[in-house]
Image: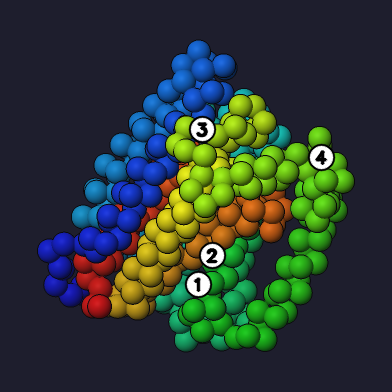
């Protein structure tokens, strides 16, 4: 039995989320207007589509915010099976669509969905149920850790067949955080770390473009017109932004220097137009969101709610750190969106659904 539900969800979390969404919609238009006008003769092309997904995501968030989070516990297996089926379907030519070298999308009319994005949340729900049921066994390598990671790496393998290393990395990283919080042994994580490092090196060596990404990360000016182009153009955007920026809409890099600036590198355009102050404000908003999420996880009335909240917060935190790390040149290019800001319907909808789950947990959380 769940305890008595509070009348309102966490209002700070809700306000921060909507603020990030408003910043994102503004920046998607600002970053994409030139490119959209050139390619589609409509400067609002990307902004309108992002607004549509934002409306759908907000409706889904409000609905899920009012659905008891224990529903995810009873439906976790069904949801993760559906996502596995979608991951298999996306690999079939004619069903899955190829973009930028990855077969990661399934077309639905004029729009497409990315099943790997929804697998992240499905895996969080499944693992939260698994860990809450077997929390005492998680210290056992064979009875706790191996079964938990088996399903995770099966999903990771299907995602890598697309291939989509960025999404797979976020999902695995999120699940490892959940297992660690649940009481996984440090010795097991050290062993997994060595195994994961070996696997990561193998994945990088198996695809030449990944080797180039690593090389460009270490020295982007070695190939300024090739593998290092995006990082260099991103830094050229951030540098002139200074303290206060060039002004909203005044970016120079969005004039076909930085490829598709409304997606993974939107933070570079934001920093160029709004400066250090604007970038810091966005990071502050994410910090507030993570703080509220951690409080909700700590105060959740049961282990399932705690693990579910931890998974959602870990997923958002990992994506933010990787995306901004890439944009400022601290990490290799991975193709990971910035939550709530980057253009992308599947990513935006998933994040708003995840926040809806977190808001529902907050209605029961004691903090």
Q: Earlier in the sequence, mark 2 or mark 4?
A: 2
In this rendering, which labeled residue sits more in front, label 2 or label 4?
Answer: 4
Q: Are marks 1 and 2 in contact (CB under 8 Å)?
A: yes
In this rendering, which labeled residue sits more in front, label 3 or label 4?
Answer: 3
In this rendering, which labeled residue sits more in front, label 1 or label 3?
Answer: 3
If the image is split into quadrants, where does the N terminus sit? bottom left
* Residue assigned mark 3: 250
* Residue assigned mark 2: 174
Real-space CA distance between mark 1 and mark 2, rounded to the nearest whole angstrom: 6 Å
Instruction: Name the secondary structure under disc 1.
Output: helix
Real-space CA distance between mark 2 and mark 4, rounded to the nearest whole angstrom: 33 Å
Marker disc for residue 224: 4
Q: Are marks 3 and 4 in contact (CB under 8 Å)?
A: no
Q: Position of residue 200 (x, y in %)?
A: 76, 61
Q: Residues within 10 Å of mark 4 (few under 14, many from 20)?
A: some
In this rendering, which labeled residue sits more in front, label 4 or label 1?
Answer: 4
Q: Earlier in the sequence, mark 3 or mark 4?
A: 4
If the image is split into quadrants, where does the C terminus sit? bottom left
* Residue assigned mark 1: 178
Q: Quadrant of residue 163?
A: top right
Q: Earlier in the sequence, mark 4 or mark 1?
A: 1
Residue at left offset 38%, top offset 55%: 354
């Amino acid at each position: 039995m769940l305890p008595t539900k509070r009348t309102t969800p966490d209002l700070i979390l809700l306000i921060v989320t909507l603020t990030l969404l408003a910043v994102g919609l503004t920046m998607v238009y600002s970053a994409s207007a030139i490119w959209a006008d050139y390619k589609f003769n409509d400067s609002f092309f990307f902004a309108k589509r992002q607004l549509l997904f934002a409306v759908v995501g907000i409706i889904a968030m409000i609905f899920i915010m009012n659905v008891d989070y224990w529903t995810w516990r009873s439906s976790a297996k069904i949801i993760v099976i559906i996502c596995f089926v979608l991951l298999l379907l996306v690999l079939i030519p004619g069903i899955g669509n190829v973009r930028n070298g990855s077969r990661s999308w399934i077309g639905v009319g004029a729009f497409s969905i990315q099943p790997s994005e929804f697998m992240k949340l499905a895996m969080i729900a499944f693992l939260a149920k698994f860990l809450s049921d077997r929390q005492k066994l998680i210290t056992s390598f064979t009875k706790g850790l191996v079964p938990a990671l088996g399903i995770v790496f099966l999903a990771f393998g299907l995602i890598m067949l697309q291939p989509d290393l960025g999404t797979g990395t976020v999902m695995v990283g999120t699940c490892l955080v959940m297992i660690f919080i649940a009481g996984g042994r440090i010795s097991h994580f050290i062993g997994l770390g060595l195994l994961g490092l070996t696997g990561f090196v193998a994945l990088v060596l198996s695809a030449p473009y990944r080797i180039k990404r690593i090389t460009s990360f270490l020295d982007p000016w070695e190939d300024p017109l090739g593998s290092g182009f995006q990082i260099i153009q991103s830094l050229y955007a951030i540098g002139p932004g200074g303290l206060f920026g060039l002004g909203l809409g005044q970016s120079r890099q969005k004039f076909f220097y930085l490829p598709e600036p409304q997606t993974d590198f939107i933070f570079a355009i934001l920093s160029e137009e709004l400066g250090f102050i604007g970038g810091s404000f966005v990071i502050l908003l994410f910090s507030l969101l993570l703080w509220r999420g951690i409080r909700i996880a700590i105060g959740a009335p049961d282990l399932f709610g705690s693990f579910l909240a931890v998974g959602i917060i870990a997923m958002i935190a990992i994506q933010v750190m990787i995306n901004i790390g890439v944009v400022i040149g601290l990490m290799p290019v991975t193709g990971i969106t910035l939550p709530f800001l980057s253009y992308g319907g599947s990513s935006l909808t998933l994040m708003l659904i995840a926040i809806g789950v977190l808001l529902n947990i907050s209605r029961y959380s004691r903090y």
